[in-house]
Image (cartoon, grey):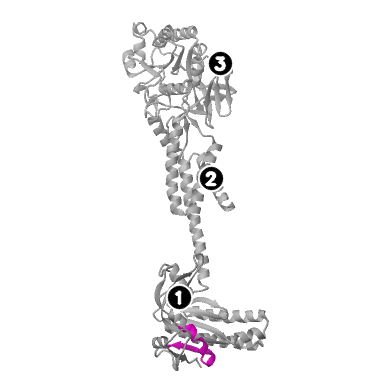
Amino acid sequence: MKKGFISVLIISVIVCLIYFIGAFKTFDNFFFDNYQKNIDTGNPVEKFIVVVAIDDLSLKKFDVWPVARSKYAELVKILNKGGAKVIAFDVNFDSYSGYAYEDDLDFSKQLAKSKNVILARDYYMERNLPVLRDPIKELKDNAVLAMVNPVLDRDSFIRRYTMLAYHRDEALLYFALQASMLYKNINNRELRLNGSKLLLADIAVPLDHNGRMLINYFSGDKGISVVPFAHVLERGFLELNPDYFRNKLVLVGSTASYLQDSFPTPVDINMPGVMIHANAIRTILNKEFITEIPYLYYFCVVLFFVAITYLITIAKGSLIGFIFSGFFMGFILILGNILYKNGIYLEKTALFFSVTASLMFGFFMNFLNIKEERTRVKGIFKQYVSPNIVDRFVSGEESLSERGKERNVSVLFADIVGFTSLCEKFPAEQVVEKLNDVLDVLTEEVFKFEGTLDKFMGDALMAVWGSPVEQKNHAELSVSCALSMLEAVKSLNARWGAEGKSALDIGISIGSGKAIAGNIGAQKHKDYTVIGDVVNIAARLQPLTREGYSIVIEEKTKELIEGKHPVNKIGDVVVKGKKQKVIAWSVAPKN
């Protein structure tokens, strides 16, 4: 459990570190842009923003660029007369007019009368330091200034809007923020930061960790009207449209393709800068915010998906884990849509990655566990079956059927002669020690001749050839093993004799024929063994080994080893449980 918890925590931390450095941003931007194009999170509103567009039509009519400052002065006069609440210019006036100084003064005088005009300021880099670029003094002194530098994502799209910046201890307000505050009659003293939110009276603007707001674009013109600059200056425009600007926030900026003041956005690959400001202002004043999940909460979400995916994969297996991973990814997509419609943006790529990573790690751990279990079972299996037979099962060359299956087998029983008297003469510890020594060497011989150790029965063992793996020469292998067992016990007796210990003899009986092989036993515990008449016959021949015959075989075994080993007929014998006599043969031990 502890190991699993640590694994989940490590995966979650790694995923979040990758997320925090922005490695998933490209994919998340794709999802965000699709949301922006297809899901409108706001409500229908009255068009309270008017964009006076310096468009291609206006430039053609004016037949000159830059436009004379006197025309801007005339525009301000008309807008104020029409009841505009705020007039904001997304136009740089950082140099004097190319016409005449009086042209600048006309504009300056009109600004002084208005007191509701915002002019653009920006900065440029000089020797790696930002330098402010303000309008000329005559204009600057009679207007409110606001920053207009765009904030581009790595792919050069504009999705976020900077609210504040600081330059030499001066707080610089950006265009949309300044326009919104002026429109709502909020002074700078009412502006304050509260954690990840910027408070403007009753408006709480959510900011990301860089102090930026996600712009809630709308592919249409919701809340925004657009009118060409040239049309506003036409005689009679205001008379025909007396309420067009009343109590409106008016932005003046370029939309002309010639001026190239456009940027890629989620809803428009060439959106004019003034329209970007308009969308940012609409986002603030309509409170149509898109909030991102804080890092700590996001880590908890990642941790949840990592934990549940990893634990299901470990507990239920890789296939079930794979199925649930697909379900989780679908759930993340649906959850992302639901949250976005409620103004919360869930970055999904890290979550997809966390599910995939935890699935793969769980799959890897399952593989290691299976390999470890396979090794463990292989080790246990080798205690009963010859190692080369085990390798055939593990490689898939052979399969082990749990259901009973008829096989041609040879069954060997090896028993210690005089074991009862041995138990009476020696302490239990010595008896067990000698018994273990004998069974060890007998088992080694079984494995040496590719047999399967079926079971130990007190001072005896039962071994099988032909099951669980088919062996055509099962009889020959069993008899060869019996002869080798006698030699192994003779060597063991020689060692015991050198140690001053008494010797032991063994008796071996073998039967060959058909038997049923399979898992046999109770519901909760089964053993893989063989049953049948051949097993009974081999066991019943054991008493003959007490009459001077070291290896006793029955007729079928004798037929199968004909010419391979010398045999002598013992005769027809009666065995327990059999009405007919059994022909018994002895195999002569090696000299």
Mark 1 or mark 3, earlier in chain:
3
Check residue 292 in the rendering and tell me which mark sits there, or answer none. Answer: none
Q: Spatial distance from mark 1 to mark 2, Cα to Cα?
A: 53 Å
Residue type beneath disc 3: Asn
Q: Amino acid at mark 1?
A: Val
Residue 179 image point, x, y percent: 48, 18
**Magenta stretch encompasses residue 552:** yes
Question: Considering only vertical position in the picture, is 56 above or below 348?
Answer: above
Q: CA distance from mark 2 to mark 3?
A: 44 Å
Q: Which mark is residue 187?
A: 3
Residue that appears at 51% across and 59% down: 369
Q: Which of the two labelled residues, at mark 2 and mark 3, occupies the earlier sequence position?
A: 2
Give percent across and percent down for residue 3.
57, 53
Callout 2 amino acid: Ser
Q: Secondary structure at mark 1?
A: strand
472 or 414: nearer the viewer: 414
| Residue 479, x across and y down, in percent | 46, 85
Task: Establish if 498 lies above or below 52.
Answer: below
- Check disc 2 and report its element: helix, strand or loop: helix
Q: Which residues are magenta?
A: 537-554
Q: List the residue tagged with mark 1.
A: 530
Q: Which mark is residue 12?
A: 2
The local crowd at label 1, few if under 14, some if 14 to 19, many if 20 or more residues have their Cα within 10 Å, is many
Q: Nearer the viewer, mark 1 or mark 2?
A: 1
